[in-house]
Every structure is written in C-alpha cells, then in structure tokens.
Amino acid sequence: MRRVYLDNNATTPLLAEVFEAMRPYFAEHFGNASSIHHHGQETRAAVERARESVAGLLACRSSEIVFTSGGTEADNLAISGVVRAGDHVISSTIEHHAVLKSCKHLEARGCEVTYVRVDSRGLVDPDEIRRALRPQTRFITIMMANNETGVLQPVEEIGKIAAEADVYFHVDAVQAAGKVAIDVNRIACDLLSISGHKMHAPQGVGALYVRKGTVLEPMLYGGSHERSRRAGTENVPGIIGLGKAAQLAMEALQRGELAHMSAMRDHIEKKILAEIEATGVNGAGAPRVPNTTNIHFDYIEGEALVIALDLKGLAVSTGAACSSGAIEPSHVLTAMGLSSEIARASLRFSLGKQNTPDDVNFALDLMPQTVARLRELSPVYHPSAAG
C-alpha cells in the first residue's frame, strides 16, 4: 500500500543529508565534547560548528544558543529560568502545552498569569498584551506560529511592547523555524525556542536562544556545559543533525523554495473547499506558515476521519500530537470561537520538505469519498441542509 505522510507538524522525517552529517558521530567520532584530548576536541569543534549554523538561522550570536533536548525543555527553561515567585506573566490561550502547563506551574508557585484571548482567525491582538501589562509584569511568552492552524502571531509588534515596558519576551518558534525567516533582533525577543524534529532534524534535540545579558536560572545542575545554562553531556549526534537541518533550512529560505510548499498547501484548501460541502479553513485570513492548513469537515468526527484515511494510506491529524487521544476538543480551535462540534470535526494537513505534488493529489483523491462515507453514517448529516 502506498503511504503518504502529511503530519509534519507532529514530526518530520530525517533528511538524508542530515543523517549523513550525523552518522560519524555515532561511532567514529564518539568523544565527550568536554574532554580536552583529541577525541573530545574533535566533537567540540563539530558542536560549535552546529551552534554557528543554528545561530545563522536565527540571526544571532553563536554564544547565545543553548542546546536542549527539544522544544519542551527549551520552553520550560526559558520560563522557569527567568520568572520568580510573585511575578506577573502574560501568555495567550492558544499556546502549546509546553508553555501553558509551565504557566500553570508558575501559578502554583505564587505567580499570576494573564492569558490573552485571540480573535476568530486565531490572532493575538498586541493591544491586548499592552492592556494586560502591570507594574509587576516580568515576562511575556507568545508563540510565533501556532502548531494546529499555522497562524503567525504579530511577534514583532509584541516585542516592541515588551521592550518599551522593559519586560522579558519569550517566543516559542518551534513551528516557525525553517518555515519563515527568523531574526531575533527584529522580533526584539530575549528568548526563543526551536525543536529539531519539526525541521527534519532528529527527535530529542532543540535549542533556546538566550539574548546576551539575560540571567537564566538553570533547570539542570551538574557540569558547566552550555556556559552553565544547561548541565549534561551534549547529545553530539543530535546537535550535529540540528546544525545541518538549520543550514539546509536557511539555504531553502534564501532560495525561496517555500513558495512551492505554500502553493501545495493552497491547492489542498481550494480543492477540498470546492469539492466537499460544509467545510472551511480554520485561521483563514490570517498570515500562516506555508506548510499548514486546518480544515473542518462538518457532521463527522475528526478522529474517525483520521483513522479512515490512515487505513487508505494517508497520515494526517486532528491537531497536536501531544494531545492525541484527548477527550476534550482542541483548546486552540475553541479559543478561536469554534464550537466543540466544529473543533472535533477539524483536520490538520502539514507538509514537509519530502512531500511532492503527487503526494498532495493522492490525498485529495481520497478526501471526497472518505468524507462522504463517514457522513452517510452520521445521524445529523443532511445533504440538503449542508448545501
């Protein structure tokens, strides 16, 4: 059976070039990057080259990059490393659970958190951030691109507000890195998180940008790794993979290759909306990353549609992979004002570098018949009313 994978926001396949860059560091170049002998210094040099590549992707100094085990750790380190008991924090209702649950933990430690709402397109209003500021506000954390809808937030405007108020600003850029250009100085953020496996690097590695001068309390204690900001022997193969993926992403952005991905995403939307009734794009009208669309198929359960499509060889999702199997509808879609029924009837299609127009056509050929079959089984679907 042919299988097509359109769930790249959950995780991306490792690119062949990335794996080849990593391969020597599993066996031949095995040294501990903290050792001062040849074997250690060999891997140390490779780690620092990877750090320079990641810094290039984010337009920052290599010394401002801290390698982590992934986006979740980077988010947690940014938040817990800066916020203190009694501080006020501003976030939004559509953040990834790595941020939302970190904020809930802060509340348990005596902090106050304001969660600003989004509009029907899934956009944060920067003026809402400004109105939420208090004298004791210390930290703002807003994602750059939403993992479920792909909607890009106005982080540059929010960065200006944070700078004017002299408040730390953290950006979760896990779903933006490699898909849109990122310049931490244009954003004016103090911290920014990325994850390797969202950009064709391996799982288990990520990075946190920490602006020079930002005092960061570590979460892990031990050696003086990562300039004493993240203790623990470096995951050298993973870091090498992240560095190579960052280099490839930067080159693709410079060549304008993502316009091709955006065209495929737009084709998915147009064909589905034209050929299947009672559908719509969640986040339509807002700026989005080029690879993501979130579409609702009314009168059916999204999870049933995911399973039916998987049986035919197509992998898509109902939303965040970390929430798979959750009983509650997507917190992102309900925050946008969608009903529980529409939120549960929504699917996310997310493209990767490996996807082709033929993959997209395979998916589009399956959609009408699969949706029609499930709607036949729905007790609330009436074609005349839907049309």
Image (tube, grey):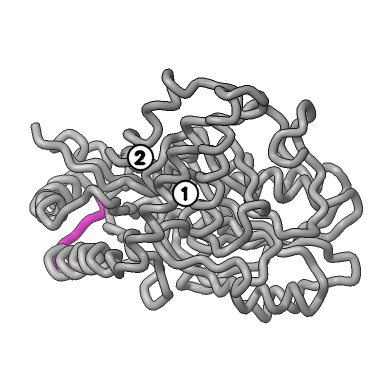
Where residue 63 sits: x, y (%)? 67, 52
Q: Measured from the top left, where is residue 338 in percent x and y?
A: 45, 63
Residue holding disc 1 = 329
What residue is shown at x 60% (from left), y 74% (from top)?
186
**Residue topped by disc 2:** 18
Q: How many marks?
A: 2
Which residue sits furthest front?
38
> Is 266 or 387 nearer to us in this picture?
266
* Residue type at numbered disc 2: Val
User: Is residue 26 found left or right of 190 in the rendered image?
Assistant: left
How far, Cα to Cα, is label 1 from label 2?
A: 36 Å
Camera-side mark, 1 or 2: 2
Name the quadrant containing residue 232. Answer: top right
Tell me where residue 134 appears, x and y as whole percent: 85, 71
Tell me the residue at 17%/51% (across/down): 371
Q: Position of residue 176 (x, y in %)?
A: 46, 59
Q: Main secondary structure of the magenta part?
A: loop
Q: Nearer the viewer, residue 152 or 176?
A: 176
170 or 33, nearer to the observer: 33
Q: Quadrant of the N terminus?
A: top left
Query: Where are the magenta residues, as a range?
Result: 379-384
Write down the quadrant of residue 114 in the picture: bottom right
